[in-house]
Image (spheres, grey):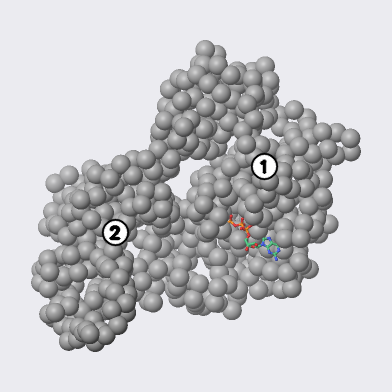
Amino acid sequence: MKNIRNFCIIAHIDHGKSTLADRLLDYTGSVTDREKQNQLLDNMDLERERGITIKSHAIQMEYTFEGQEYILNLIDTPGHVDFSYEVSRSIAACEGALLIVDAAQSIQAQTISNLYLALENDLEIIPILNKVDLPSANPEEVTDDIVDLLGCDAEEVIHASGKTGFGVDNILQAIIERIPAPEGDPEAPLQALIFDSVYNSYRGIETYFRIMNGEIKKGQRIKFMATNNEYFADEVGTLKLNQVVKQSVKTGDVGYLITGIKTAKEVKVGDTITDAAKPTTEIIDGFEDVKPMVFAGIYPVDTEDYEELRYSMEKLQLNDASLVFVPESSAALGFGFRCGFLGMLHMEIIQERLEREFNMTVITTVPNVSYHAYTKKNPEEIVLLNNPSDLPEPSKLDRVEEPYIKASIITKSDFVGQVMSLCIEKRGEITNQTYLTTERVELTFDMPLAEIVFDFYDRLKTVSKGYASFDYSPIGMKSSKLVRVDILLNGQPVDALSALLHADNAYHIGKKIVEKLKELIPRQQFDIPIQAAIGAKIIARETTKALRKDVTAKCYGGDISRKRKLLEKQKKGKKRMRQVGNVEIPQEAFMAVLKLND
Ligand SMILES: Nc1nc2c(ncn2[C@@H]2O[C@H](COP(=O)(O)OP(=O)(O)OP(=O)(O)O)[C@@H](O)[C@H]2O)c(=O)[nH]1
């Protein structure tokens, strides 16, 4: 046990975590040449393409230092706020963390929020100044920032480059010398923390764990404490680039477990595994059920594909326990599902995975957060509001509450004014302002989550010229004035275009939505009035004028291949169109409310 080191890497997105992890694997000879790929840890196609780590993974390295052999378990963590719960679990499985800071970007919002998580878990922090090879790197200044943040000495900050491999040896030495070996009692009853799980279509769910006390043996009868379900440990082992089957995995080590479980729901990240016959009395604390934050409708483009969509979503859920969905129907779109996501990125990922892995083309409706409504009849009972159509009639409605977050934004002092106005426009209330250095400021706001869902990231990037980073955590519900803005096309309400908006913004946003829809809805053979309404009251109107020319008219008698190309193009464009009444609506229109400022 004294030669084991468990560590994770924490960083703001794009500061070079995955690249550096690959370097460590390379340097310790943990990968053969054949296995070398650009980003080894990001083994989902989607992850590699987007350059982000979606799910955490673990990997074991062996390294000989001063004549002693060490086992280094690296637990990779996702960098995006949508997945911060997974970060917190991976952190809990370690004794130390490499804190990576980009030498050109310096400290950013997630550097700080992840650092706090690591400190809460008493991890030893090894600060690393990464990307020192960049011409724009600013090593002295950024080192000062790190020293200020951590209260460490400048000598403790390791200079490195994931690109050239510079400094990797120093990092490995620091891992061995500075991070404590795991503690724990090998004789005690089994107590292991689940920090991740992965779905494998042949073997069922693979559970990743870190053993705090005791050991886990092949064939042992074990129990998951959150669910109280018992299983046999069909296979256990450690994690190299591939799994290495073992007879047992012991205290302090990190490993995987296969029990024949088929659905991701049964395995909860953060849960404790123990022995069924001789259970531990202590649950590892910190376990919480992750709740979806953002909801949207997902519909098949072709109504006939509904059953297939259900099948695909069920398959996807086996794999991703944080995805929730219930059937819903819309007058405009037919049968589909109301889905809950951890955040906007999670929503995009699900949509993309449906397309890539299941070949499903879907239409996603305007996302909204989950409100709590209370009716006059029963003012104590919460009615969960995940869908605009569920909003009770104004006469029956007592009050509505909406979820709030604590938002932390780090930016340059030059942009404080603009960032503040943006946050105030988004109904934020400033709670704190701290100068991290003379140039960098951390602003903290209490804000409605709903405002983040709508175009917040993009606006923040624009007003700060890219020099702002953002992180948030939920802080509970607050009362809100909510109205439903309906959209009518050609006089017909299209339920899938309805949005829940704060009363103060409803007129303004309603007008903008209508203007945006005018741009997005293709012209047809007749005029299409586009209206926004609150209840029976029309608050805005635009008209898409009738089409005058036939696009292919010119091609008659002309070059047939050109005409075919045009028609092909038209067909492609149609793929994501939905006929509602006699109006064709493209997918972009359903999301128009998110892009009002483009
Ligand atoms: N010049 C230079 N570029 C680097 C270095 N390390 C990483 N990069 C580049 O920075 C970008 C982000 O690197 P990643 O390793 O994917 O960043 P990450 O922190 O893992 O990102 P997430 O997984 O999304 O959190 C990539 O384009 C890398 O090629 C470095 O040391 N020097």
Lower sequence index among marks 2 and 1: 1
Q: Position of residue 200 (x, y in %)?
A: 48, 36
Can you tell which quarter of the image residue 20 is in?
bottom right
Identify the residue at horizontal 68%, vertical 20% (top origin).
186
| Position of residue 82 in the picture relative to residue 105 (left or right) | left
State the residue in front, 398 or 249: 249
Q: Is residue 400 visible?
A: no
- The reply to whether residue 565 is visible in this rendering is yes
Indicate left or right for 279 with 446 as reference. right
Q: Quadrant of the C terminus?
A: bottom left
Residue 478, x across and y down, in percent: 34, 55
x 78%, y 68%: residue: 140
Quarter residue 411 falls in: bottom right
User: At 23% from the left edge and 48% from the top edge, which residue is drawn?
Assistant: 306
The answer to the question of whether label 2 and label 1 lie on touching residues, with beta carbons closer than 8 A, is no
Relative side of 417 to 363, left or right: right
Residue beneath label 1, please? Answer: 74
**Considering only vertical position in the picture, is 514 above or below 282?**
below
Question: What amino acid does circle 2 point to?
Answer: Ile
Residue type at mark 1 is Leu
Q: In the rendered image, which quarter contains the N terminus?
A: top right
133 or 355, which lies in front? 355
Q: Which residue is mark 2?
A: 363
Circle 1 residues within 10 Å: few <14, some 14–19, many ≥20: many
Label 2 to label 1: alpha-carbon separation: 39 Å
Query: Quick check: 584 above or below 344?
Result: below
Q: Position of residue 254 (x, y in %)?
A: 64, 32
The secondary element bearing badge 2 is classed as strand
Farthest residue in the right direction? 66
Badge 2: how crowded within 10 Å, few (<14), some, or many (20+)? many
